[in-house]
C-alpha cells in the first residue's frame, strides 16, 4: 500500500538525508520510498525547514479562508442589491457567476456551493443542435398572433400535426424573449389603482 507523507515528514527526510553517512539509495530503501521520489521532494522543498513548512501551510489556509470570506461577501452584496442588480436565478446566470468567482481565485467547487449550483450542472453543455426551422415557426406564429402566449402557439403547432413537447416551445419563447404585450386597458387599470392608493396615503 502506498504511504502518504505530510509535508513536515518529507522535509524531515530531506534534512536527515543530508546528514546521514549512507548513500541516498540506501537511505531511501531504509525509509521505504524510491530514490526518484526523494529527489522530487528535494527539488520541491529545497532548503526549507519543518517550521517553515508549517508556517507556509498556515498561510495557505489563511489565504483560502480570506478568499471564501470575500466570495461570501460578494454573493451577499449581489443578493442584497435589489433592483439595481439582476438576480442570479437561471442556470446560465449562475454559470456566469461561477466564472466570475473563478477570476477572483475562488475554486469551482466553492463557487458552486455559494451559487447553489450543482457542479454537474455547471459543467453540462447542451449537445443538441438548435433547430432553426422550428424556431422560425414559433417566431412566425408569435408575430402573426401577438396576443397569443406559448400555450396557444404550442396548440397551433399540434394542429399542424407536429408531435412536440410544450417545453420545447417554452425554450424558444425564452430564448427570443417572446412576451405577450400588455393591453392598454390593463395598463389603464393599473394606473388608476396606483392613483387611488396614492390618494389613500396622502396626508389630510
Image (cartoon, rainbow, N blue to C red):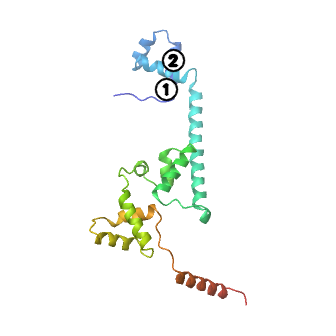
Residue 191 in the image: state x and y as whole percent: 60, 83
Q: Are marks 2 and 1 in contact (CB under 8 Å)?
A: no
Residue beneath label 1, please?
A: 9
Say which residue appears at 43% left-offset and 49% top-offset: 119
Of the residues under marks 2 and 1, which one precedes in the sequence?
Answer: 1
**Circle 2 — which element?**
helix
Mark sitting on residue 16: 2
Say above or below: 26 vs 57.
above
Return the x and y of residue 81 as percentages of the image width and height. Answer: 61, 62
Q: Residues within 10 Å of mark 2 (few under 14, many from 20)?
A: few
Q: What is the crowding at mark 1: few (fewer than 14 residues within 10 Å), some, or many (at least 20)?
A: few
| The C terminus: image quadrant | bottom right
What whole-number distance in Å separates the C-alpha atoms at marks 2 and 1?
A: 10 Å
User: Which image quarter holds the N terminus?
Assistant: top left
- Please name the residue shown 29% across and 70% down the image: 158
Q: Secondary structure at mark 1?
A: helix
Q: Position of residue 115 (x, y in %)?
A: 50, 54
Q: Residue at x 36, y 56 (%)?
A: 131
Q: Which residue is at a point 42% across and 47% down the rendered structure image?
A: 123
202, 196: nearer the viewer: 196
The relative height of residue 72 versus residue 143 in the rendered view (above or below) is above
Amino acid at each position: 500500500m502506498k504511504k502518504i507523507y505530510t509535508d513536515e515528514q518529507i522535509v524531515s527526510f530531506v534534512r536527515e538525508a543530508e546528514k546521514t553517512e549512507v548513500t541516498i539509495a540506501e537511505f531511501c530503501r531504509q525509509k521505504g520510498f524510491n530514490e526518484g521520489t526523494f529527489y522530487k521532494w528535494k527539488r520541491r522543498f529545497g532548503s526549507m525547514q519543518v517550521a517553515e513548512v508549517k508556517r507556509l501551510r498556515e498561510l495557505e489556509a489563511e489565504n483560502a479562508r480570506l478568499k471564501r470570506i470575500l466570495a461570501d461577501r460578494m454573493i451577499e452584496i449581489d443578493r442584497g442589491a435589489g433592483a439595481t442588480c439582476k438576480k442570479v436565478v437561471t442556470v446560465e446566470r449562475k454559470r456566469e457567476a461561477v466564472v466570475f468567482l473563478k477570476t477572483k481565485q475562488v475554486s469551482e467547487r466553492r463557487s458552486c456551493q455559494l451559487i447553489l449550483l450543482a457542479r454537474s450542472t455547471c459543467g453540462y453543455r447542451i449537445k443538441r443542435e438548435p433547430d432553426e426551422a422550428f424556431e422560425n415557426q414559433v417566431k412566425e406564429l408569435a408575430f402573426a398572433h401577438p396576443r397569443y402566449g406559448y400555450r396557444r402557439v404550442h396548440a397551433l403547432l399540434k394542429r399542424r400535426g407536429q408531435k412536440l413537447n410544450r417545453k420545447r416551445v417554452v425554450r424558444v419563447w425564452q430564448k427570443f424573449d417572446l412576451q405577450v404585450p400588455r393591453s392598454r386597458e390593463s395598463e389603464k387599470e393599473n394606473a388608476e389603482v396606483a392613483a387611488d392608493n396614492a390618494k389613500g396615503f396622502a396626508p389630510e
